[in-house]
Image (cartoon, rainbow, N blue to C red):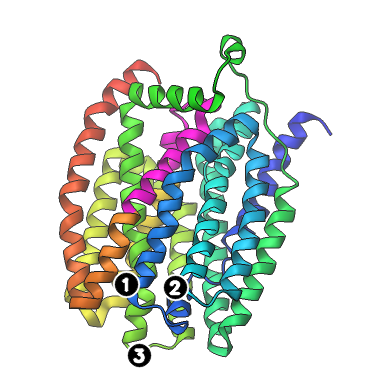
Amino acid sequence: MSINDKLKRNILVSYIYNFLLQLNITSAIWVLYLAFRGMSLVEIGLLESVYHITGVLFELPTGVIADLYGKKFSVVTGRIVSVISCILMITSDSFLGFAISFSLSSAAMNLNSGAAEALVYDSLKELGEEEKYKKIWGNLAFVMSIAQGLAVLLGGILADVRFLYAYIFGTIVQIGALIAAYSFSEPPIHKDKKQEKKQGNLIVNQLVTSIKVLKARRMVLYLILFSSLVASLQTTVFFYSQQYFSDMSYSKTAIAIICALSSLIEAISSKYAYRVEKVLKLRGTLISIALVNIFSLLGLALIKNLSIEFFLVTSITGGLAFTIFSDYINSRIPSEYRATILSFESLCFSVFMICVFPLFGLLAEKIGFSITFGIIALLYIPVMMFLMLKIRKHQVKLDSDGV
C-alpha cells in the first residue's frame, strides 16, 4: 500500500476510532454514579478538578511526545491507559480510588488530544487537500456527536438497570478504540534540517519553539483561549445538568434521552458548521456563540420550566465552535508543532475547568442550581468580551502576514 493510500485510510480509520472514542456511555451518568457511590457534590467537583489538574501537568509533555515520537504512538498509549482507568472506576470504593481513576483518564485524553486531530490534518496536508479539513472535521464531529448521543442513551438505560453494566460496556468499547488506533499510519512531517540536527533536550526545545510560534501568532493564542472558555462553559453545564434534572425528578433514562438529543443537535451543527462560517465569518461566529451561551445560562437561571430547551440550545454552539475553531487554529500553525500547540489548547481548557467546575459544585450545593447558572453567566460576559476584542485586534495583522 502506497503512502498516499495509507494517509487516505487514516481518514476512514479516524471515523471509526473517534466514533468508538466518543461512545463513552458513562459520560451522562458519572455524576450520578459518583453520587450513588457516596460522593458529595463538592467531592464530585474536586474529582473533576483532579482530572483537569492532571491535564495541566501532562498536557504539553504529551503533545510534545506526539510531535517527537509519533501521533499514532501517543493515541495507542492513551487508549491503553484509558482501559486501566475504566477498570479502576469499577473496582474503586473511595475518593482516593476514584481520584486515581480520574487522573489516568485525564492522562489518556492528554495522549489523545492534539495527536488524533493532528493525524487527520497532517494526512490531508501531505495529500495536498488541507482545504477539505473543515468539511471532513465537521463530518467527524457529526460522527462523534452521534456516538455521544448513543452513548448517553445507552448509559442512561443501563444505569437504570445497574450502574455496573454501563461501566463494563464502556470498558469493552475502549478496548475496541485501542484496536482501531493500531490501524493508523503516521503521516510524514517535513522538519527543518537544521532543527533536526540540534542537540540537547528535545522536549524543552519543542516547548520553547511552540511558545515562540504562539507569540508570533497572537490571534491563534486568543482563539485557543476563547475556544477553551466556551468548551469549559458547555462541559460544566452538560455534566451538572445531570444532577439538576435528577433533582427535578427526571429518571436516568429521561436524562439520557435529553443528553442524547443534545448530542444529535450538536452533530447536525457540526456537520453544517462550514456553511454557517461562510455566512457569519469569524467575527459573526464569535459573537453568535458568546451571545447564545450567555442567553442559555441566563435562561437556565430564570426560567426553570424551559430548562431543557435552554440546555439543548447550548448544543448548537458546541458543534459550531468545535469545528470552526479547529479549522482556524490548525490552518495557522506549522505541522511539526501541531500536536504540542493543540495540547496547549487542551491545557487551557483544563485550567478553566479547574476554576469553574468545583466552584459551580460548591455554589450549587449552597445556593441551588438556578442562581449558580446566573452567576456563571455574569462571570463569563467580561472574559468573552475581552477575548473577542483581542482576536479582532490581531486578526488583521496575522492574515496580512500570511501566517
Residue at the disc numbered 3: 249
Q: Residue at image x 21%, y 62%?
A: 376
Sequence-first disc among 1 and 3: 1
Residue 299 seen: no
Dot 1 falls on a residue whose secondary structure is: helix
Residue at the disc numbered 2: 259
Which amino acid, by three-letter code, is at mark 2? Cys
Q: Nearer the viewer, mark 1 or mark 3?
A: 1
Which amino acid, by three-letter code, is at mark 1? Val
- Side of 234 relative to 122 (left or right): left
Q: Residue at image x 48%, y 73%?
A: 30
Which amino acid, by three-letter code, is at mark 3? Ser
Q: Residue at image x 17%, y 73%?
A: 371
Residue at the disc numbered 1: 42
Q: Nearer the viewer, residue 138 or 337?
A: 337
- x%, y% of residue 187? 67, 31
Q: Residue furthest top?
A: 194
- Side of 259 relative to 376 (left or right): right
Secondary structure, magenta segment, majority class: helix
- The image shows residue 90, relative to residue 380, as above or below, that is below
- x%, y% of residue 269? 43, 56
What is the quadrant of residue 22 in the picture?
Answer: bottom right
- Can residue 344 be found in the magenta stretch? yes
- Range covered by the magenta-colored residues: 326-352
- Side of 67 relative to 176 (left or right): left
- Can residue 188 be found in the magenta stretch? no
Quarter of the rendering occupied by the C terminus: top left
Q: CA distance from mark 1 to mark 3?
A: 21 Å
Q: Nearer the viewer, residue 49 or 5?
A: 49
What is the quadrant of residue 31 in the picture?
Answer: bottom left
Crowding around mark 1 (Cα neighbors within 10 Å: few <14, some 14 to 19, many 20+) is some
